[in-house]
Image (tube, rainbow, N blue to C red):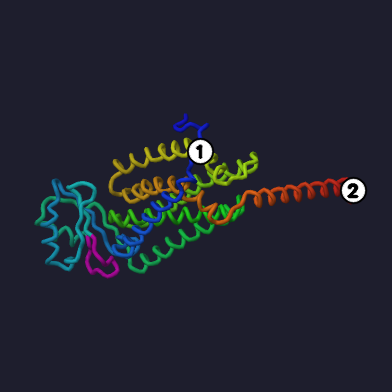
Amino acid sequence: MEIFNTNKTYDFMGKKIPFLMVSAILIIASIVLLTTRGLNYGIDFVGGTIVQVKYDKDAPIEKIREVLHNTKYANSVVTEFGTKDEITIRFTGSSSDLTHDISDEMNKILVPTGNFEIRKIDMVGAKVGAELKEKGITALVIAMFAMLAYITFRFEYRFAIASVIGLVHDVIISLGFISLFKIDVNLDMVAAILTLIGYTINDTIIVNDRIRESLQKTKETNLDKLINESISRMLSRTILTSSTTQFVVITMLLFGGEIIYAFTFTLFVGIIVGTYSSIFVVSPFIKFLGFKIDDYRSKEIKKELERKEKEKLRAMYEQGRV
């Protein structure tokens, strides 16, 4: 199945400046959001307690806040949880610093608010939350360096640097949308970003592989034209892969419930941004970083000659001539 005509070459490199300007605007806006508004860290990272409560009708949020105001939970944050009859109450403090059972206390405090049941209580200590945050950031950094090393080994260091620039581009913009929509940042979010890194780098590697294949099979010396032809041949495959993945993500986003909302929202935004960057961001940076076709082909010829020389020496050794 083809969405775009594979015999037609689209001028992606000719439009690189407008697309990179769009990326620059999105990155600047994301950084401003992250600086001013910040991220809404969940209890996984800052510690605290979340009490999930379900009512038999619409939850009286204002009444709940009023009741909690006269207790030691006065600073609690009360929000809807997916539906109007279900809420979460979030506050600092865990079982280590509370003298009574939280479930019993909440059952007594919320009596005036109607018929309800406490479905779940999650507690994370502040120290554990800090450790989880540190490990989450470490996992992201290690993933970036691992990708850099792999692509350098498989392709060429300029491809690797351009690909990592694309990954940083995707992560920053995704975090900007997370900040904009005030999505809770928790361990699920870290898992989503790591999944996103794997997904987008796979897309980028396929495009890079097509560029390398064109370098080896054609005599084209114009880098812009070669990149345009390579991406044009892969465009239908890239769009189809992203679209089919998004169908699943959108289904999870709409029907998966509040539990996995942060995870699916991050994937939804990330796949769009990642597909965009693999086409319009990574390839221009390969050129900006000084990649030259003639130098690359010369190195490949030298590597091939060295390989043949090694094979010749090995054959002579096996025949007892060395």
Q: Nearer the viewer, residue 120 or 269?
A: 269
Residues at discs 2 and 1 in contact (Cβ within 8 Å): no
Please state the horizontal and vertical placement of residue 236, each as a whole percent of the image. 47, 35
The verdict on residue 45 being magenta is no
The type of residue carrying mark 2 is Gly
Q: Nearer the viewer, residue 57 or 292?
A: 292
Mark 2 vs mark 1: give the one in front: 1
Q: Which residue is mark 1?
A: 232
Please state the horizontal and vertical placement of residue 80, each as a whole percent of the image. 20, 52
Using a 10 Å C-alpha cutoff, classify the residue at mark 2 as few (fewer than 14 neighbours), some (14 to 19) or many (20 or more). few
Q: Which residue is mark 2?
A: 320
**In the shown orientation, is residue 277 left or right of residue 116?**
right
**Is 280 situated above or below 138?**
above
Please state the horizontal and vertical placement of residue 165, each as a whole percent of the image. 48, 56
**In the shown orientation, is residue 64 left or right of residue 259?**
left
Give the CA separation, mark 2 to mark 1. 52 Å
Please state the horizontal and vertical placement of residue 258, each as a whole percent of the image. 28, 48
Outermost residue toward the right? Answer: 321
Main structural element of the magenta stretch: helix, strand or loop?
Answer: loop
Helix or strand or loop: what does disc 2 sit on?
A: loop
Helix or strand or loop: what does disc 1 sit on?
A: helix
Q: Which mark is residue 24?
A: none
Q: Nearer the viewer, residue 61 or 307?
A: 307
Q: Which residues are magenta?
A: 90-102
Q: Nearer the viewer, residue 217 or 183?
A: 217
* Residue visible at 29% across and 41% down in the picture: 254
* Residue visible at 51% across and 36% down in the picture: 9
Using a 10 Å C-alpha cutoff, classify the residue at mark 1 as few (fewer than 14 neighbours), some (14 to 19) or many (20 or more). many
The type of residue carrying mark 1 is Ser
